[in-house]
């Protein structure tokens, strides 16, 4: 019982900090502070994922969201401007859109199974097979790794391809490879 | 040569080794603990990026030149896809790691996962560092007072 109360307490604290960070991000004008707060937001999300026992996802969130993204946003900041322009006060329409969307999302969660429900579709489809057979078939203690790299090896190959494509895209767009080639072409 | 930020420079030099070691740990211990190629690749890239942030782009590009980064980008995907091709040639299905040790499929799975995760890690490291280089190369030098 105390364990459940403790988890609820941690959840409430983390979510309050998450909301406070989000509000601070919206209200701030200094983009440097906003980037730092976005890193804080990522770290808080990572902590929430840890409380959901999704350590692999939390790990990724902390490394990518709080680490790399912050560096890239700082790089973008250095290219553009360091403070946000004052925006005109928006009317009621954005508030209405946000409230309606939020209400729709909350309404959508009413149908969802409870957290950790053993009868939830996600826990009754292929997951029991993976959990039962991966020690014998794969022999790797971390079932997440077994699923990711072996059972779903094609998916992960595709993901690696996506990461590769994204890298190539960024290189073509902003690294100046094309510009250099054109300059070389001009010399000829 | 930058003569200020003494504490930053010393701490960075102390941290880069452990960061890389941790990346290798996450990479090769992913079978047993949280983590794997994606996370390890990002952490390994962070080691280079932090060096670039503190010591300047030119310095880090001497250690890890852009042409090498661009090769690694493709090499990782090749390692991953090549693993599947090897298992094909051994008479098994694409990416069926049982092919590597036919008399003991579990060991084959272990090897396959290790190699495939290495491919993921190499590509992710390459992509992250390449994106950082691409951004940083466009960035004008900022004087410290501006921040």
Image (cartoon, helix red, strand yellow):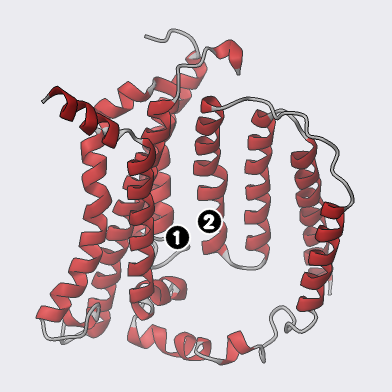
In this orientation, does residue B100 appear? no
Q: In this view, does A103 lie above or below A127?
A: above
| Spatial separation of the CA atoms under disc 2 and disc 1 | 7 Å
Q: In which quarter of the image is the C terminus of chain B?
A: top right
Dot 1: what SS? loop
Q: Which residue is drawn at 33% across and 62% down?
A: A161
Q: Mark 1 lies on which chain?
A: B
Q: In this view, does B96 lie to the left or right of B44?
A: left
Badge 2 element? helix
Residue A121, horizontal then vertical, whole percent = 62, 89
Residue holding disc 1? B35
Q: Is residue B9 visible?
A: yes
Residue at position x 41%, y 57% from top?
A: B38
Q: Report in which chain the residue with disc 2 lies.
A: A
Task: Count how many numbered circles sit on residues in the image.
Answer: 2
**At x 53% / y 56%, what residue is drawn?**
A59
Which residue occupies the foreground of this view, B139 or A150?
Answer: B139
Q: Quadrant of residue B86?
A: bottom left
Q: Name the residue under label 2.
A: A59
């Amino acid at each position: 019982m105390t364990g459940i109360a403790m988890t609820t307490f941690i959840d409430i604290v983390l979510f309050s900090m998450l909301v406070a960070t989000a509000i601070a991000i919206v209200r701030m004008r200094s983009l440097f502070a906003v980037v730092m707060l976005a890193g804080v937001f990522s770290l808080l999300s990572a902590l929430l994922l840890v409380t959901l026992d999704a350590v692999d996802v939390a790990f990724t969130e902390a490394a990518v969201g709080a680490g790399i993204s912050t560096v890239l946003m700082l790089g973008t900041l250095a290219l553009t401007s360091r403070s946000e322009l004052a925006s005109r006060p928006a009317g009621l329409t954005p508030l209405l859109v946000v409230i309606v969307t939020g209400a729709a999302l909350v309404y959508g969660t009413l149908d969802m199974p409870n957290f950790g429900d053993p009868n939830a579709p996600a826990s009754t489809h292929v997951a029991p097979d993976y959990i039962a057979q991966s020690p014998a078939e794969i022999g790797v203690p971390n079932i997440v790794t077994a699923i990711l790299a072996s059972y779903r090896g094609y998916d992960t190959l595709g993901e690696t391809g996506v990461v590769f494509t994204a890298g190539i895209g960024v290189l073509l767009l902003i690294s100046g490879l094309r510009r250099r080639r054109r300059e070389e072409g001009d010399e000829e | 040569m930058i003569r200020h930020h003494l504490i930053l420079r010393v701490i960075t030099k102390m941290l880069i080794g452990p960061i890389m070691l941790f990346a290798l740990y996450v990479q090769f211990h992913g079978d047993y603990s949280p983590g794997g190629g994606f996370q390890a690749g990002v952490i390994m890239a962070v080691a280079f990026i932090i060096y670039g942030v503190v010591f300047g782009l030119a310095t880090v590009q001497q250690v890890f030149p852009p042409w090498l980064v661009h090769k690694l980008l493709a090499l990782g995907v090749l390692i991953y896809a090549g693993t599947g091709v090897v298992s094909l040639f051994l008479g098994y299905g694409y990416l069926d790691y049982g092919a590597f040790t036919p008399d003991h499929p579990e060991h084959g799975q272990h090897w396959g996962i290790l190699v495939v995760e290495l491919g993921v890690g190499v590509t992710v490291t390459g992509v992250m560092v390449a994106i950082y280089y691409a951004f940083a190369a466009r960035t004008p030098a900022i004087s410290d007072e501006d921040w």
